[in-house]
Amino acid sequence: MSYLPIKQLLQSTTTGHEVTVKGWVRTKRESKNAIFIALNDGSTINNIQAVAEPGQFSEDLIKLVTTGACVAITGQLVESLGSGQSVEVKAANIHIYGPADPEKYPLQPKRHSLEFLREIAHLRPRTNTFSAILRIRHALAFAVNKYFNDNGFFYLHTPIITASDAEGAGEMFRVTTLDLDNLPRTEEGKINFSEDFFGREANLTVSGQLEGELGALALGKIYTFGPTFRAENSNTTRHLAEFWMIEPEMAFYELEDNMNLAEDFVKYVIRYALENCADDLAFLENRLKEEEKTKKKEEQSDMSLLEKLRFVVDNDFQRLTYTEAIDILVNSKPAKKGQFQFEVKWGIDLQSEHERYLVEKHFKKPVILTNYPREIKAFYMKQDEESSASPGPTVRAMDVLFPGIGEIIGGSQREDDLDKLMARIHEIGIEPEGLWWYLETRKFGSAPHAGFGLGFERLVLFVTGMGNIRDVIPFPRTPKSAEF
């Protein structure tokens, strides 16, 4: 018999025919009248039940049907008498592909902590929680590519190995083929990178944005979607050393166009998950509800997982300037009562608590903040004209803020004036020689353009309701951790 995914079998409208199911045993339960085997193949959060009669198979065979074992079961698809499923398989043949010693297999049918599951990341996709997360991650990735393709964008593959630091932060992983036990040196005693593979210093990319701008200034609208790397020694629930970034860049877009695209894009991908991952989201919502019960009342979320997702999809995003946001925060009750952990004043980089107040308490809708102080933003952002409305110089930046997470998208209109860009580069101490190729796009046919970046894991974190970013990527890379 040809193998059919369990998801497809559970949707069957006909019974009485022979089928073969293949997968991993979740549970086995024996009674006087029957042996019940719950099987899952990863195609769905739901298991299919196979039923065997006592004595139908040898004891030696049944002993090998344990949690974690991989099996194939052939039998008749029949209406189920049990609750929770409409069909089940009346087993006629059981084949063991791979046994799993119940004394050693770590994923026995009981509750496991997320910390423990991170230690066995090679097996955690077999759990309900992580199989659901990975299916949703796939759906979101598909939606990202579909959205941009359907809207006339070209997928640009920017380099993983680069010689530039897009953000100017200096937190990069170095790439080298030099013998670390016998490094070549210059006469001054410095490492001689001219003998390295690329003949110069090279590193893993921190962003595809700068190269993405080159593509946009030729193709019109492009997007990158690939891995990026930050050698930031941050052991937090929000940071990874290796993560995926979505970075569209658009010629002839200004700040308003950029905001419109960001809002439409993020609503689309979340709506796609709601429409195509209903079972997995329902499971994760129930999981989150149980988790919330263990928290103090003041720490519990005001919205369920699905309510948060619909909160984004169903609301027009509130738009205001950074300066207006600071005024709101300074005059808020938490600020006046000293309840914010971080001080609020013009010029600060807003913290998550400030962003969440604006979204969850003040406006009660997603927020897009614009026109940030120049001093806290990157060199490539378009400088605003001086205005009496702001205490200091600002740039045409934008951040999209979500409930529960704060900033999820950061972007800007890019500086297209060569003189202003050069002045800013010199001001913050970047060597222009290393960016000659980037600067030449401002010499030859410069054009207004804009773009934004969305950390894919931040998006998956929001959509799944998980609390730690290490739980939304298959194999997290963090300080002192590079297993698997």
Image: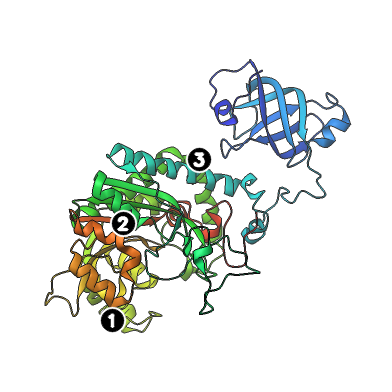
Helix, strand or loop for disc 1 = loop
Mark 1 nearby-residue class (10 Å; few <14, some 14–19, many ≥20): few
Q: Position of residue 429 (x, y in %)?
A: 33, 76
Which residue is drawn at the image coordinates 52% and 42% (left, top)? Answer: 135
Residue flagged by tag 2: what amino acid is it? Phe
Residue lying furthest left: 388
Q: Position of residue 67 (x, y in %)?
A: 74, 42
Mark earlier in primary sequence (3, 2): 3
Mark earlier in primary sequence (1, 2): 1
Along the horizontal axis of the image, is 99 left or right of 162?
A: right
Q: Nearer the viewer, mark 3 or mark 1?
A: 1
CA–CA distance in space, label 1 to label 2: 26 Å
Quadrant in the picture for residue 31:
top right
Do the numbered discs 1 and 2 sit on residues whose CB atoms are within 8 Å? no
Do the numbered discs 3 and 1 sit on residues whose CB atoms are within 8 Å? no
Helix, strand or loop for disc 2 = strand
CA–CA distance in space, label 3 to label 1: 45 Å
Residue that carries the numbered disc 2 in the rendered image: 452
Residue that carries the numbered disc 1 in the rendered image: 345
